Image (cartoon, helix red, strand yellow):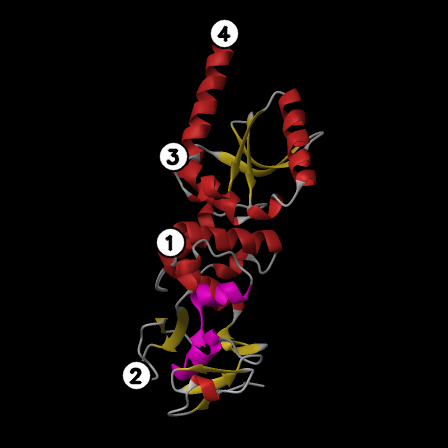
Amino acid sequence: MKWQPLVVQGLSLSELPEGVARYRTCVYLSDRMTLDEARAFLYNGRITCLSAAKLYGLPIVDQASVQHTHIALPRNRGLHYSLSRMMDDVVVHRETARITENPANPWVVDFRQAVIRCLACADIEQAVAIVDAVRFRRLCPVEDLQVPDDVPGARRIREALRRSRGGVRSVLETMARLQLEDAGIESRAAVEIPGVGEVDLLVHDRLVVELDGWEFHSGKAHWLHDLERDRRLVERGFLVLRFDYDAVVSRSEVVPAVRAALSQAVARGRR
């Protein structure tokens, strides 16, 4: 069932009963609809791109990118400024192809269309993070995301697919790998080390890069586990660098540290 808001005029927020929210000239049941869906209703469109990706549980690199609701509209449909449509809280995507809805939630475009729109619009870091997640979670065959050359954004889509890798478990791994790749440093993701387990990234077969999101710092047990892994890696002749969330998202710490570690490894080898 497609739940629709009720368009109203002159109703103050203080008059709204519990469970009823207001957006511009409409009110809606907050347990039946989200703000994104209410915006889609007033703009007579469908949630797409990064807003849809977030609903599908895909990683969002910058949360500011989904503060506005991404709305898909047919290219030939008129859209005029009004009190209901002030254009200040949406990103409108004009689609030439038919907009296909998700059967489970008709306010949202289907999964494939949402992902393709992300790859065509988002920067390369965000786009690759989405494809990496699709691969790792096996949400759909990556081949299904390929598009003909004449589709708008086809070149960006191909680039995201080309730079994606299997086995990448988190957006931090994607970000760190791309930072290294852009600096000319190749790495491999999800490499199994005998006696240790799977490591996040392996550079030049000897330097292990481990990435710790906030969720992995919940207690002493996780900290001790990381120390034990690092010890076993060092015993096997590996160098280990460990970066937290802030170090990765700063985009200024990973590459210099890796370069320094590689230089030290080369210097030791000459002695």
Q: Name the residue under label 4.
A: 271
Q: Can residue 84 be seen in this view?
A: yes
- Residue depicted at x 49% and y 55%: 130
Callout 2 amino acid = Gly
Residue depicted at 53% across the width and 56% down the height:
142
* Quadrant position of residue 206: top right
Could you give the CA–CA distance between mark 1 and mark 2, rounded to whole angstroms?
Answer: 28 Å
- The answer to whether marks 4 and 2 mark residues whose Cβ atoms lie closer than 8 Å is no
Q: Residue at x 52, y 71 (%)?
A: 110
Q: Tell me, yes or no, whether the highlighted magenta stretch contains residue 50.
A: yes
Give the amino acid at mark 4. Arg
Kindly give the residue lying farthest to the front in the view shown: 14
Q: Do the residues labelled 4 and 1 touch (CB within 8 Å)?
A: no
Q: Earlier in the sequence, mark 3 or mark 1?
A: 1
The residue shown at (59%, 51%) is 136
Give the distance between the C-alpha atoms of the residues marked 4 and 3, in whole angstroms: 27 Å
Tell me where residue 2 appears, x and y as whole percent.
54, 85
Q: What's the distance in space between the residues labelled 4 and 2, CA to CA?
A: 72 Å
Relative side of 231 to 28, left or right? right
Mark 3 → mark 1, Cα distance in angstroms:
17 Å
Badge 1 local density, few (<14 within 10 Å), some, or many (20+)? few
The residue that disc 1 covers is 123
Residue 99 visible: no
**CA gap, disc 2 and disc 3:** 45 Å
State the SS at label 2: loop
Residue 153 vertical position relative to residue 102 in the rendered view, above or below: above
Sequence-earlier tag: 4 or 2? 2
Q: How many numbered discs sit on the rendered protein?
A: 4
Q: Residue 183 carries which label?
A: 3
Q: What residue type is labelled 3?
A: Ala
Span highlighted in magenta in the image: 35-56
The dot on residue 78 is: 2
